[in-house]
Image (cartoon, rainbow, N blue to C red):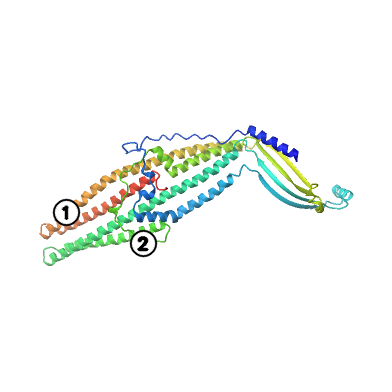
């Protein structure tokens, strides 16, 4: 036993002298980021994405929907299960540097041929025609991490865990944004329904006036038919809006992990409040904040460690095996201590020489994969910058569109009043009234749509900057 102890001590000291290689150094790719986002006047370090979603969305009903979504959304729950799975693998990876230890108990009986040399020897020496062998032993196997292969394997597990964590954050940003988008779309449909019902009252009034004028002979039946068609068109629109509202409520219910049901709302779209003075911050900060970009960088870090593993496989491997226990050829004295004790230690260095170019191929493939992931990381950053720029230009453009659409609605509403007065005075025909009402209806519906798009562009910007996972 003392010799075994001295052998192990000498071996450990030797390993300490040669173990100098760890994981490969990582050099962050040159991302060539702009100093500031396009369509921003100055490079402001503050960013709206730093706000927690509860601060960004102040509507209590929307907050409740988002809380339900974060708790119950199935895509998010699946992502969390993936995190839990990766966490278990990460825990297991921490034990890679420890030896494998096993315990085995075996019993064997061999009966050679009586005409064989072994058979005759048994009868001569043991006075029996069979051999018994009973063994109970602990077996140990350990590979020294001279070239950092195990460290890189642990790093791969850590990167994979962090990828699932970032992927979960990315799913949450998408869920939060999707719930907000669906909620604002529902408010837009409510507003359009209100507009359609108000216009239906105008159509009924126009039809009533036209029928009276037809009865008095001041207009033709064609005027009644046109006014009726205008009313029917508005009724059809109301039916379509009722369908769209129900479908949107169902979609929102599914997003928050519930069976399709009605969504309560107590405010109108005009009462919604989102941050108006939005600061995008710096592109470099966005890269470190966006979960999907961080996930892609972690993929790159993983591939860097895979190169280290492939490289270490080309170098000599030092493995130590040991076993010890009790052994006897008779069951009666199997556990007689110390006579039945045995032990062995074996240390060996294995250098791969010819593997049909497999090791070199693995290394080259790992390097190519790392280069591919560098390109994928750069592409993800470029896409992220593009999404932010798109959201910024949409938000600025929709501000102007909302102003113009509001002015158009005011003009056309005044036009309805003028047309009705002229029609009653016989100075305008029914077509002018119907046209004025139709134009006003479309303008109001368009204004509601533009307002919803404006809200959506703000939500898109918040998500594109990496907000929504806090």
Q: Which mark is residue 464?
A: none
Q: Which mark is residue 415?
A: 1
Q: Few, some or many C-alpha atoms within 10 Å of disc 2 (few <14, some 14-19, many ≥20)?
A: some
Q: Few, some or many C-alpha atoms within 10 Å of disc 1 (few <14, some 14-19, many ≥20)?
A: some
Count of numbered circles on the image: 2
- Say what secondary structure mark 1 lies in: helix
Quick one: 94 or 180, which is closer to the camera?
A: 94
Q: Which residue: 68% across, 43% down?
A: 141
Q: Quadrant of the N terminus?
A: top right
According to the picture, the residue beneath numbered tag 2 turns out to be: 262
- Say what secondary structure mark 2 lies in: loop
Residue 361 shows in this picture: no
Question: In the rendered structure, which disc, 1 or 2, sits on the residue that comes first in sequence?
Answer: 2
**Marks 1/2: CA–CA distance:** 37 Å
> Where residue 385 sits in the image (x, y, percent)?
38, 40
Q: Nearer the viewer, mark 1 or mark 2?
A: 2
> Where residue 415 sits in the image (x, y, percent)?
16, 54
Residue 165 shows in this picture: yes
Q: Is residue 139 left or right of residue 121?
A: left
Q: Do labels 1 and 2 touch, CB within 8 Å?
A: no
Q: Is residue 61 above or below residue 357?
A: below
> Where residue 303 sits in the image (x, y, percent)?
52, 39
Q: Is residue 143 left or right of residue 464?
A: right
> Where residue 341 sits in the image (x, y, percent)?
77, 46
Q: Quadrant of residue 280?
A: top left
């Amino acid at each position: 036993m003392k010799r075994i102890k001295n052998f192990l001590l000498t071996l450990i000291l030797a390993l300490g002298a040669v173990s100098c290689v760890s994981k490969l150094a990582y050099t962050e790719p040159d991302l060539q980021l702009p100093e500031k986002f396009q369509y921003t006047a100055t490079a402001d370090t503050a960013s709206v994405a730093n706000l927690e979603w509860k601060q960004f969305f102040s509507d209590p009903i929307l907050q409740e929907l988002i809380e339900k979504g974060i708790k119950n959304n199935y895509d998010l729950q699946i992502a969390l299960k993936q995190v839990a799975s990766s966490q278990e693998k990460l825990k297991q990876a921490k034990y890679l540097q420890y030896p494998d230890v096993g315990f085995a108990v075996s019993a064997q009986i061999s009966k050679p041929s009586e005409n064989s040399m072994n058979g005759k020897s048994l009868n001569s020496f043991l006075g029996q025609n069979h051999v018994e062998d009973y063994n109970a032993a602990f077996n140990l196997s350990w590979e020294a991490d001279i070239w950092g292969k195990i460290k890189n394997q642990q790093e791969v597990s850590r990167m994979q865990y962090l990828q699932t964590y970032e992927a979960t954050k990315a799913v949450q940003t998408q869920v939060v944004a999707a719930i907000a988008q669906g909620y604002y779309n529902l408010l837009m449909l409510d507003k359009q329904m209100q507009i359609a019902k108000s216009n239906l009252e105008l159509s009924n009034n126009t039809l009533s006036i036209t029928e009276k004028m037809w009865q008095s002979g001041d207009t033709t039946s064609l005027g009644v038919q046109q006014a009726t068609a205008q009313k029917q068109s508005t009724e059809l629109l109301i039916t379509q809006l009722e369908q769209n509202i129900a479908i949107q409520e169902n979609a929102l219910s599914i997003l928050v992990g519930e069976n399709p049901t009605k969504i309560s709302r107590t405010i109108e779209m005009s009462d919604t409040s989102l941050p108006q003075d939005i600061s995008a911050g710096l592109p470099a900060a966005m890269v470190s904040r966006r979960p999907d970009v961080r996930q892609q960088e972690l993929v790159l870090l993983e591939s860097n460690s895979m190169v280290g593993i492939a490289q270490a496989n080309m170098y000599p491997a030092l493995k130590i095996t040991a076993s010890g226990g009790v052994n006897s050829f008779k069951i009666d004295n199997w556990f007689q201590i110390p006579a039945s004790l045995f032990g062995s230690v074996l240390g060996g260095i294995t250098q791969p020489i010819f593997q049909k170019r497999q090791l070199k191929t693995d290394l080259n493939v790992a390097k190519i994969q790392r280069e591919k992931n560098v390109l994928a990381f750069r592409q993800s950053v470029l896409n992220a910058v593009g999404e932010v720029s798109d959201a910024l230009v949409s938000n600025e453009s929709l501000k102007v569109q909302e102003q113009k659409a509001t002015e158009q609605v005011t003009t056309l509403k005044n036009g309805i009043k003028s047309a009705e007065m002229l029609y009653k005075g016989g100075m305008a025909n029914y077509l002018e009234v119907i046209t004025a009402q139709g134009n006003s209806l479309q303008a109001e519906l368009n204004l509601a749509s533009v307002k919803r798009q404006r809200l959506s562009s703000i939500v898109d910007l918040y998500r594109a900057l990496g907000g929504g996972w806090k």
